[in-house]
Image: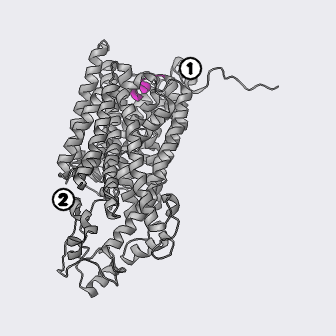
Amino acid sequence: MDQFTINLLFVGSSFALYIGIAIWARAGSTSEFYAAGRGVHPVTNGMATAADWMSAASFISMAGLIAFTGYDNSSFLMGWTGGYVLLALLLAPYLRKFGKFTVSEFIGDRFYSQTARIVAVVCLIVASTTYVIGQMTGVGVAFGRFLEVDNTTGLLIGACVVFAYAVFGGMKGVTYTQVAQYVVLITAYTIPAVFISLQLTGNPIPGLGLFGNDVASGEPLLTKLDQVVTELGFNSYTSNNADTFNMVLFTLSLMIGTAGLPHVIMRFFTVPKVADARWSAGWALVFIALLYITAPAVGAMARLNITDMMWPNGGINGGAVEVAQIKNDPKYDWMHTWEKTGLLAWEDKNGDGKIQYYNDKREKMQTLAGEKGWVGNELTKFNRDILVLANPEIANLPGWVIGLVAAGGLAAALSTAAGLLLAISSAVSHDLIKGAIKPSISEKSELMSARVAMAVAIVVATYLGLNPPGFAAQTVALAFGLAAASIFPALMMGIFSTRINNTGAVAGMLSGLVVTLVYIFLHKGWFFIPGTASFSDADPLLGTIKSTSFGAIGAAVNFAVAYFVAGMTKETPQVIKDLVESVRIPRGAGAAQDH
């Protein structure tokens, strides 16, 4: 059976399962569409939350960014995991206790303002739309390779699949679909990692193999990797080469952005009790850890494998891979299949019949290249988003493993895309239409408006996904920055401070959103239109602060403006102060007693 047929079997079977579950669990009411009827078991919800959380950025892109940068991109791991802990401890239980369907509804009621609710809807839509661009990018990459079509066609197919199960299933259908998707994606991520870890280190546990010895050389794997990449002119894999200030801001931006993501917060509205929200968060951390502990090993081992394939004769002194070998050796078939997607390319620039892969930007390598007759890096394109999907092929693993990874990559992208689209549609139908425009709308009409809003969101996300502002994980980082600057501060102040009034909250959200959005557009192009950027992340506007790191600055602006405006305007009503206290303090709690 050829690889294309195997891919079709795995991908087709998984899609049939997702759509079947969506039909079985189809939402029949707004409560089921928005919150799955508040009847989801904590373990089930934890697994669904993990799938919602581990998007294309986690499954497809993160290991690729770590592989080609090393230690400096470990901030993705630290920021995303740390942010989830913040969400679990500081926000989720209190928001569940408040008992609303959406984040915007909480903000509107807590700040006793329809304006605050509408501003929260705008912030949510901007952050979620940016986030979903990254998911659709991942969908296009995965479909393009494994169905052997171009990237655009793959993205359009993925959009149709999301439409089929998310529009009709709502939160109820999405929840149980995400449970299935978690099983698929964690299996697909772990099995290839185990195979590759055994090949390189003899250890079946990738996280331990990362700190073990390379079988071929007998040296520690990371020491071997450092030697290989520095020989080619790249930065040491295990050392910190980036600007520390920007790295701290980036990690903080990811952390507080995570805690402000509406589509993840919505998952905690689906459980019966506040205690279940806490248990859900704990289980989700367990399920997330299974992938996040493995990701650094996947990145490091893949980088070593790729470098060895490009220099199969013992490094620079042994000689680069020959063009004839790439064309004729089955071990290199993966390069031809990925070349068809437009995400991988190479060129024999100097006509010597070999493909030299090295860092041609470094001065010492330019000197060496001059001596050897090289004219530049000949692996001209290697999109970071393809690394995890190509990993089984690079390691020459069986065809069924490749098919499994195809299904897993699509499961990761589609599960998060569905959650984001649900958050957008809920904000439009429940908060905007029912909450502000037409409060008298019937439940049937509200449900229909939610489905229409989701369909429109899918179309917009698909269009923007055709020209993303970066790799999947980089695009997602921008979304986290927007959530960090606009939603997270409002939630924190809404739960833990009675001082912030409606005017302060609105001013804070708007200022945080606008200043962050403008900074991102200046670096990524206005509305992500190519050619409209004034700066780049290589040469940022403010010192070393990249657009992906600015969310932390935006959050500080939000907090500062909210407190300043609240101090200059009318005090929060007593009834709202009492509401905040009732949400934050457990029922029956009183003053400490001396016994």
Residue furthest to the bottom in view is 371
Badge 1 vs badge 2, beta-carbon distance below 8 Å: no
Q: Nearer the viewer, residue 178 or 345?
A: 178
Q: Residues within 10 Å of mark 1 (few under 14, many from 20)?
A: few
Q: Quadrant of residue 161?
A: top left
Q: Nearer the viewer, residue 593 or 392?
A: 392
Q: Residue at x 80, y 26 (%)?
A: 594
Q: Residue at x 42, y 62 (%)?
A: 196
Q: Is residue 288 magenta?
A: no
Q: Quadrant of the N terminus?
A: bottom left
Q: Is residue 190 above or below residue 158?
A: below
Q: Residue at x 36, y 73 (%)?
A: 308
State the residue position of label 1.
578
Q: Is residue 27 above or below residue 50?
A: above
Q: Secondary structure at mark 1?
A: helix
Task: Specify start and end residues of the magenta stretch as a single range.
Answer: 99-107
Residue furthest to the right in view is 595
Residue 213, percent across and down? 51, 70
Color style of the picture: one colour
Q: Secondary structure at mark 2?
A: loop
Residue 22 vs residue 197: left or right?
Answer: left
- Labels 1 and 2: the sequence-earlier one: 2
Q: Looking at the picture, which amino acid does disc 2 mark? A: Lys
Residue 256, percent across and down? 46, 43
Q: Is residue 162 above or below residue 71?
A: above
Q: Which mark is residue 340?
A: 2
Q: Residue at x 33, y 56 (%)?
A: 541
Answer yes or no: is residue 241 visible. Answer: no
Q: Quadrant of the C terminus?
A: top right
Q: Is residue 105 magenta?
A: yes
Residue 191, percent across and down? 42, 54
